[in-house]
Each structure stands twice: as C-alpha cells, then as structure tokens.
Image (cartoon, helix red, strand yellow):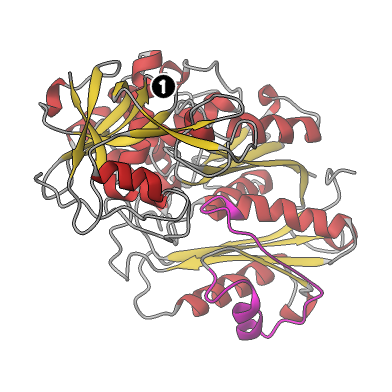
Amino acid sequence: MTIKGRAYIAGAYEHPTRHAPDKTVAQLHAEVALGALADAGLTRADVDGYFCAGDAPGPGPASMAEYLNLKLRHVDSTELGGTSYVALAAHAAEAIALGKCNVALITLAGRPRSEGMATGTTPRLRDPNQPEAGWEFPYGLTTANGYAMCAMRHMHQYGTTPAQLASIKVAASHHAQHNPNAMLPDVVTVEDVLNSPVIADPLHRLDCCVISDGGGALIVVRPEIAKTLNRPPVKIIGAGETVKHLAGGTFDLTTSGAARSGPAAFSESGITPADIKYVSIYDSFTITVLIQIEDLGFCEKGAGGKFVADGNLISGVGKLPFNTDGGGLCNNHPANRGGMTKVIEAVRQLRGEAHPAVQVKNCDLALAQGTGMQLGTRHCSATLIMERQ
Amino acid sequence: MPRTIPAPVVTVETQKFWDAARAGRFTVPFCAACGKAHWYPRAICPFCDNGSIEWREASGKGTIYTFSVMRRAKEPYAIAYVTLAEGPTMMTNIVDCDFDALDIGQPVAVVFAATEDGPPVPMFKPE
C-alpha cells in the first residue's frame, strides 16, 4: 500500500495578510478554505474530508467544520506543531487512497502578531501533565534558546559558523524581495545578520523567523477529480513522518527527525535527493534549515555550513533553491506554524507559478520538509514529495 | 539568583526526587533491571520497560553538552544540557559563572537553586 500517485494537490492558497487585528481566527480559516477551493475550481459542497491541527479554534475539527458548514465523511485533527500541514497533506492522500474521502480540505490560520505573542523568547508552561514539564520550565526554556543550543552544538561538532548560518537568511531575503506580501522584503547581508542583536547565543534576531498573522489552505483530491480541473495537477508521490526526542537522555541535538521522515519519503517516491529541483524547508531559525538539509541528504552531515555559504539555497544561483517565497525567515510564519506555506510554495514551483525571478526551471520534483515544536527537545518531522504531472 | 526560578511540577512519579532535593541530595533514577540511568525521571525505564526504578545519589559531576546564554531577557541566563557522569544528559542552567567563558565539554558540578514556592532545582556551576 502506498500513497504514490493516489492523490493530487488541486488547490493551494496563502492568505495575503500578515497582520489581521480586524479578523477572527475562525474567519481566517474560512477565508483560506474558500481561497483554496476557488483556486482548485471546486466548491464547499465538494469537500467531504476536513483536516486541521492545533491552530483550529476549539478541540479538533468540530468548530471549524460547523463554522464552514461542511458535510464530512472523513475528519483528521493531527497536532504535529508547525509541520502538521506537511503531514496532513499525506494523511489526506492516505484517506483518499483508502476511499474515505474524495476532496480533502486542510486549513491553517492564526493571529500571533495581533495578539502580541512573544513567541520565541518567553518560557511557557504549556501543560503540567506533560511529563517533561517539571524538568524544563524552571530552566527558562524558550523557543529561541532551545534552537540556539542545537546551533551551539552543531558549531562545536562540525565547525559551523554564525556567518554560515547567516547566509541562510541572506538567501531567503534574496527571494523575499520579489514577494510583495513578504514581511521583510529587503535583501540583507551576512553582516546585517551578525550585527543584529543576539537573542540567544549564537542566534541573532535575523536568524529568527518573523511573527505574522494569516494562514493557508490546501485541497487534495482523487486523481479522477484532478483530471477534470483546470489547474496544473501536483501529484503526491511520497511522505514520511516521525517524532524525534531526548530518548531518556541519550540524544544528538545536531540531527532532526528529517533523518527518518526524509528517507521514508524518498523510499516511497522512488527518487533520490539529487532528483529534487526545489525544496521548501521549515525555517523557524536559520539552524533549522541547516540541520534539515543535512538530514535529508542534500549534503553530508556537518557540511551544511559550507553548502549554504556557497549560495546553494538561492534560486538561479545554487544547487538547491529553497523557500522562494522568502520562507518563514522573511515572508510569513502564520500562526507560528510554517508547514502550510512550505507546501504552498512547493505547489507554486511545480505549477510554474512562483515569481518569475525565483521560478526554478523545469521544476518537476519538489520536496516540502517541516519540523514542528522544538528542535532542542522534542519535535515532529514530516516530509512530502510532490511531482508535476 | 538574578532570575526568579519557577517551582518545578512535582508529580507522584517524581516526589522522591524532590524530597531528596529539599534535603540537598541530587539523585538520579536507575533501572533495577537493566542498570541504566535515564533522564528526565519517570516510573518506567525508557530502555527496558521495567517498572523498578531506584533513586541513587549521584556524583553531581558532569560536562556541558551544549548551552546558550539567553540575552533577550531581563537578566541574561545560561540554559544548558549537561551530560552526567552517570550517563544521561539533562537540561539545566549554568550559574555562578562568567557567561562569556562557558564552553562545551567544560566540567561542572551540581548546585541547588531555590525556586519561587517549591523544592530547589538542580543547576550546575563550572568546577
């Protein structure tokens, strides 16, 4: 049993807003749902499967299913943090392959910017029933210093430098300059990144992603339906997911779950990293990108610093064009969850609808990779490989 | 302590650890069946699934696996993972130190830090 070729991404929509104090979270979910349906050429009445994650208001899918007035025969609420939507695209393909639904809607939306959330720098006790809570919260674990510890270890183990990490932001900014909706549209230099204030050693402010309101949605359909639609069809050909954690105190912070979800996705799709023309890589921080591209096999473990400093992530310049929308580092990180926009930009590339200045030539195979939650402790990883039909 | 340390979450699984901490003793959970120490502490061994966990007084010695000084905070502080002499690596803070002199591999020793309204938590300082 495989999902290879069993489902297509027929609709994709990224909300243009980056600041939405005048909208509710439910309203944003609805706007992106309708945007993706319109993109696909389908209507709300066609949707028979709904997929969402922890950003959907209320527990699970019920509140949004009601708000949207959906009639469903398959639902899936899977919380994998920011990478949820990479995994949900695969879950939708699984459900379609099993005949559980024909038209799957996946939504993401949130307003952390309007709500003034200090996303990355405030320690938060999320749930005292989490067994690790007592062993982390007192020490001031935040999003930023957790990822920073991964960066510090990677620098120690492999000689990676802050300037090499900075070149990831530089690459993202080269792409963001062509995106009129990007929060940070200005091209930056390595020096700009290194001169920005240190948040948590060794990560600077410009090593961090933006905080934005907004959202996005995907429509995944059966092949027979995809053939009837006018949009360029994007075939799902492989996926993987996993959780990487501290394993009882025996761990290596320089690797991510991509080292497991990536090979699973490549195996299912029957292709290799060398075949991939474009990648969307979750970029909560610059170090997040570095670790994942190594773990996916785009360069050797530990060689990521040189790989990115050589400009390989810049479209039209390097071997592995990434995040051509500017990514979370420069464009958009709606609801503090970057997985949805990762899939959306991969779909744009496969359709040939990315900005002409960053469109990858002959882009027939693309990969979207995300990590959700915290690289410095435990995180979910999801990999999705797609092919232009 | 420059930073106010919130109280740890104490559960029935970890009560003995925090009782020992109040008495100034740093204990580590060992599995009676496979003999391995683990972290964070739990009632079931993550390596062999056995439910016979013994709390043993630890050496309090370790080395810094990684760290980061949180600069964007009212009072900067150093979060770290320390690999204990007993084997597992634990999250902690490095205190009583020059933040700019911290290094991976540096030997450290346990100290207990008072919390707001709970038992003290184990932290480490350079040896």
Give the residue at mark 1. B86
* Of the pair A251 and A261, the residue shown nearer to us: A251
Q: Where residue A119 appears, x then y in whole percent?
A: 33, 56
Tell me where residue A105 sits by quadrant.
Answer: bottom right
Q: Is A2 situated left or right of A143 in this image? A: right
> Could one spot residue A143 in this view of the protein?
no
* Quadrant in which the C terminus of chain A is drawn: top right
- Residue A158 colored magenta? no
Tell me where residue A198 sits by quadrant.
Answer: top left
Q: Where residue B70 appears, x then y in whole percent?
A: 21, 40
Secondary structure of residue under mark 1 = loop
Identify the residue at horizontal 60%, vertical 81% (top origin): A63
Q: Is A264 situated left or right of A23 in this image? A: right
Compared with A92, A43 (above or below) is below
Disc 1 crowd rating (10 Å Cα; few below 14, some 14-19, many 20+) is some
Identify the residue at horizontal 28%, vertical 42% (top origin): B21
Q: Is A313 situated left or right of B119 in this image? A: right
Identify the residue at horizontal 30%, vertical 63% (top origin): A117
* Quadrant in which the N terminus of chain A is drawn: top right
Q: Where residue B12 appears, x then y in whole percent?
A: 45, 55
* Of the pair A215 and A76, the residue shown nearer to us: A76
Q: What residue range appears in magenta?
A: A56-84
What type is the residue that disc 1 sits on?
Glu
- Residue A60 colored magenta? yes
Q: Where residue B63 appears, x then y in whole percent?
A: 31, 19
Compared with B113, B106 (above or below) is above
